[in-house]
Amino acid sequence: MGTDWEYYSPRPDDARMAAERERIDFFREQPLEAESNWRLILVQLDDFGGPPPPEFYFDRCRETLRSRGFSNAVVDEMERIVHEIVLPYNEQLPYPDLWPRDEILEPAIDWHFRNGAIDEVRRNKLLEFAGHLRPQSST
């Protein structure tokens, strides 16, 4: 009976480097224009099934939001809401959302309100902020 290390066959360095280059190129070329404002921030919570994206990918998401007219302060507030409100809510779900979507914002805010973590004034401000950053429907 063998041990795991006896069967371990590491990829040659060239193959590992090629795979890493391919992964970097994927995140460099990933189109972000069609992503919603909130999705560009929620992507930080994704479970990518491997190593997280390179830091420049998150910088690209922030830059896309800035190109849409959002200030650094607004983007920072969006990130804070995602980490303080959405992440704890998502983690307590029986089946956490591995690819969080915009629809997770309101339930997360309401969950914090129901559990007494935020008061009604804060809840209303968060809901207003979240709604303000959603794209307006063209009907």
Image (cartoon, rainbow, N blue to C red):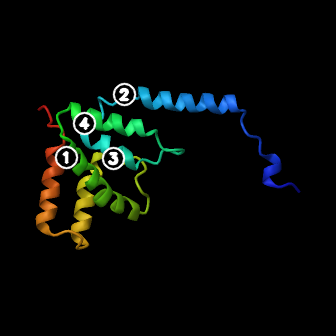
Badge 3 or badge 4: first in the primary sequence: 3
Numbered circle sitting on residue 42? 3
Answer left or right for 138 relative to 99: left
Badge 4 or badge 1: first in the primary sequence: 4
At horizontal 18% and vertical 50% (from top left) the residue drawn is 130
- What count of labels does the image hold? 4
Numbered circle sitting on residue 31? 2
Q: CA distance from mark 3 to mark 4?
A: 12 Å
The quarter of the displayed image where residue 11 is located: top right
Badge 2 or badge 3: first in the primary sequence: 2
Q: CA distance from mark 2 to mark 1?
A: 24 Å
Residue at the extreme bottom of the image, as rendered: 116
| The C terminus lies in quadrant | top left
Residue 85: x and y, percent?
28, 60
Q: Residues at badges 3 and 4 in contact (C-beta under 8 Å)?
A: no
Badge 1 or badge 3: first in the primary sequence: 3
Q: CA distance from mark 1 to mark 3?
A: 17 Å
Report helix, strand or loop for mark 2: loop
| The N terminus lies in quadrant | bottom right
Residue 56: x and y, percent?
40, 36
Q: According to the image, label 1 marks what residue?
A: 73
Q: Amino acid at mark 1?
A: Ala
Residue 101: x and y, percent?
32, 46
Numbered circle sitting on residue 65? 4
Please tell me whether mark 1 or mark 3 is closer to you in this view.
1
Other residues around mark 4 within 10 Å, as few (<14) / some (14–19) / many (≥20): many
Q: CA distance from mark 2 to mark 4?
A: 13 Å
